[in-house]
Image (cartoon, rainbow, N blue to C red):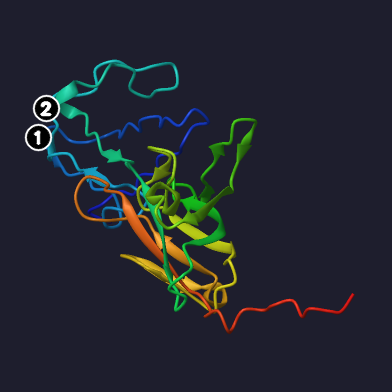
Amino acid sequence: VTDSLPIRLVKNDDGTYDPVRIHGVPIGSVCTVTEDGEPGSFGESARSNPEPVTVTVPDTEFGEDGLPANDIPLAQVATITNTYGVTGLQVTKIVTSPDEKADEFGPFEFELTCEFNDGSDTPVPVTWFDGTEETDTLTFSLGGKLSDTEAWTWRAPADSIPYGAVCTLTETNNGGATFVLFSGDNVVMNNGNVGATITMVGEGDAPEVAVDVQNIMPGPNERETETPTDK
């Protein structure tokens, strides 16, 4: 004998879930329906659990299979709402250089991939439309004249990254930097200091996640130069 009944809802191909009807509940019972796990366990940004339901109307109609066939009153329907929000990503390039005369750096090239939990058993890749086809990898570059402020910040397409997604940002071309530092909330460096893992969560209503990528550039005497040859 147990005082709880496990219920499993299976996701349909169209993203909906068929309701589950519980039979044989005594009249007058007060039932509490709670989803397992803490809010966010299934990738949701918010969860609304229903108030306890009191069963007052009995099953009155039965089908040929012997199961109840009458509609359940709305007062005896428990609905759990999982909200899957979206968030944004901003990447800002910062250059530190001992060469005071240098006024242009880059290009610094990046790749971005993300995965999220949609309630299924395996993470799902985030996909974007690049103008020609869908892709699970975004590429972009930063850099240029220091005076061109727009050239130093990139933003992911709006409303394209689910809240709670885990993203991998990799700098595939560091512009000749001697060291690269990724920083920001929920940012962990990896891949031998050429990338970072970013968990897309924050305070408030799915705010934009900001990542700074600082490149330490070599001085003028540290750069490789071509040795002149006599002609």
Is label 2 in a helix, a strand or a loop?
loop
Taking the image as shown, residue 42 lies to the left or right of residue 61, namely: right
Q: Who is closer to the viewer here, 231 or 164?
A: 231
Q: Amino acid at mark 1?
A: Gly
**Whole-percent x and y of residue 81?**
26, 37
- What residue do we see at 50% from left, 52% from top? 114
| Residue 41 vs residue 25, the one in the foreground | 41
* 193 in relation to 109, above or below: below
Above or below 92: residue 51: above
Q: In the image, what residue occupies the spot 39% across and 16% down? A: 63
Q: Are marks 2 and 1 in contact (CB under 8 Å)?
A: yes
Task: Specify whether 157 is left or right of 82.
Answer: right
Residue marked by disc 1: 28
The answer, for residue 172, to whether it is visible in the render is yes
Q: Secondary structure at mark 1?
A: loop
Residue visible at 25% across and 38% down?
80
Q: CA distance from mark 2 to mark 1?
A: 6 Å
Q: Which residue is mark 2?
A: 56
**Few, some or many C-alpha atoms within 10 Å of disc 2 (few <14, some 14-19, many ≥20)?**
some
Residue 193: percent from the left, percent from the top? 52, 75
Residue 34 percent coordinates (x, y)? 23, 48
